[in-house]
Image (spheres, rainbow, N blue to C red):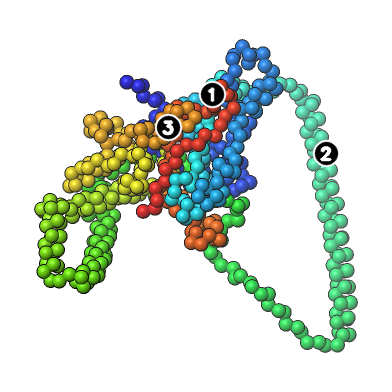
Amino acid sequence: MAAKNPYLSDYTYLGEPISLIKETEVDYNDPYVSKIGGRPAWITINEMELAFLQIEESKKRLMSEEELQQFRKSMVPDRPTNKTLSCKNCKAKLYLVAQAYANLGPNDRFLYVFGCNNTQCSSKSNSWVALRCQFEIDDSLIKKTVSQSTSTTTHSESSEPIVKIDEYQVEKIQSDEEEEEDQEESNNAQEEHDSEKQSKEDQEDQELRELLKNSQINNKAPSKKKKKKKPKNVVPITNKQSPQILPKNTLPCYSLDIFEEPDDDLKDILTKEQSHEFKLFQEYQKKQSTYDQLDQAQSSAENDDAMMEEYNDDEMEEFSNQMLERNFKTSGGDGGGEIYEETKLKDFTTTLLRFSSILQRCPHQSIRWQFGGQPLWCSTKQEHLPPTWPKPIKQDPNSKIQIVRNFDHDGDEDDEDDDEDESIRRVNVSQFVPKCENCGASRVFELQIMPTVVYQLKCSEYANIALQGNEGMDFGCVTIFTCVNQCSTFSNESKLRYFKEYVHVQPPI
């Protein structure tokens, strides 16, 4: 049995926007700041200062500081090309949607997620790109830096003076300070006198100019005043906030506050069928069912009229009997077909209800992170899942909790039933998503972007209005699966790389 990966996370962490970051601020270009929107903060030589250098210790000792710095510079990854960061559908340049600093063990890891701000493209997986870059931190350099900062602090906080000053020196210093203060007061008094004199002269000159001006005006013939023309196309000033002026293909940038997801009891929410959300779903189902019945009745009536023209009464009666018999056998003799459709609708309702209920815990959450966790799907329809994802296990339609538990992603150790149902309710993600293209290892779920980002970044205000019907990106959720081995370079190379990871997007519901 394979050993469990020690870096798999047992808890889900959320990210909420807390403050707007301007392009001139330091955090805007800091890769260690998790954010949504803005421009990507790529890895530079500054981040390599504490990186572990893949050099033999004997060779490292012989290298000068300049040679070590040059080696660090060679490790800096090349930035992705414009082709990599372009939409595969409309060929437009992608926008940075989220950037996350997600360290695991000794590794500093950075995730970048780009998406197309086109309504038609944003719900397709090939219009998104997820990049990962990481490097190992050298613990010895961190300890050295900490010890140096500690010694500097101790030295600055020392209360004993290095040089002793005798009484004569103290008196001399005091007398010098008094002379400087007297001289400064004298200079200030002289400046005030000069300024008053100058202001008085300026006032007299101003009065003289006014008198001359008035005399010239009185000597001129009276003329009609010309009306000022009102400027055209004046936009009235309103309190409505206008979109922030940003560089092309850029969204507003907000820093994220990362915290552990609150552990609320979701079962109580889902079992209450009389909750507000469930009532809304029931009303929607009734209306949708009524509309479907009307459409079917209208279509059936049109077909009946066409058939009446071709068949006589005896043939129509025989045909009707055959159709009734066929429907009876399909439904199992007791209306089973309707129950099957109702069960499918219940599954869909429960999944969406669970999604909205978890979102209600923290309504402003932008991202969800759990390395090795389970994605929070907004739909379990087969066409909305990854191509090889397993179908939901059919459960007793009267037990909604069992259906929900199949896709539960929380690793709550206090739940006694977790160990018993682990193989049933959790999906082994590694079996159903493509393997890492670099090292061939399996991928695990790591990051999810929630649909709240669309409104937080005001994507519609920065959409290309030249495209007809384009209202900006719109999606249900964006899930990112990353390499479980956390590969950082190509084999036999020290240069870091930005590796593409697997992205799956669910359309808006």
Q: Residue 179 — which label?
A: 2
**Marks 1 and 2, how far apart at CA:** 74 Å
Residue 65 sits above or below residue 330 on the image:
above
**Label 2 Cα neighbours within 10 Å, binned few <14 / some 14-19 / many ≥20:** few
The correct choice, above or below, for 172 with respect to 470 in the image is above
Label 1: state its secondary structure: loop
Q: Which residue is mark 3?
A: 435
In this rendering, position of residue 360 left or right of residue 46: left
Most foreground residue, 405 or 214: 405
The amino acid marked with disc number 1 is Ser
* Residue 315, picture quadrant: bottom left
> Callout 3: 10 Å neighbours few (<14), some, many (20+)?
many
Dots 2, 3 in contact, CB < 8 A? no
> Would you place residue 51 above or below residue 78 in this image?
above
State which quarter of the image contains the N terminus.
top left
Q: Earlier in the sequence, mark 3 or mark 1?
A: 3
Report, in whole angstroms, how far the alpha carbon at label 3 lies from the one at label 1: 17 Å
**Where residue 225 appears, x then y in whole percent?**
76, 84
Identify the residue at image location x=72%, y=82%: 227
Residue 449 in picture, x, y percent from top left: 44, 45
Foreground: 166 or 136?
A: 136
**Mark sitting earlier along the chain (2/3):** 2
Q: Amino acid at mark 2?
A: Glu
| Number of the front mark, 1 or 2 | 1
Q: Looking at the picture, does residue 473 appear above or below residue 152? A: below
Callouts 3 and 1 close, C-beta under 8 Å: no
- Disc 1: which residue: 491
Q: Position of residue 364 (x, y in %)?
A: 42, 49
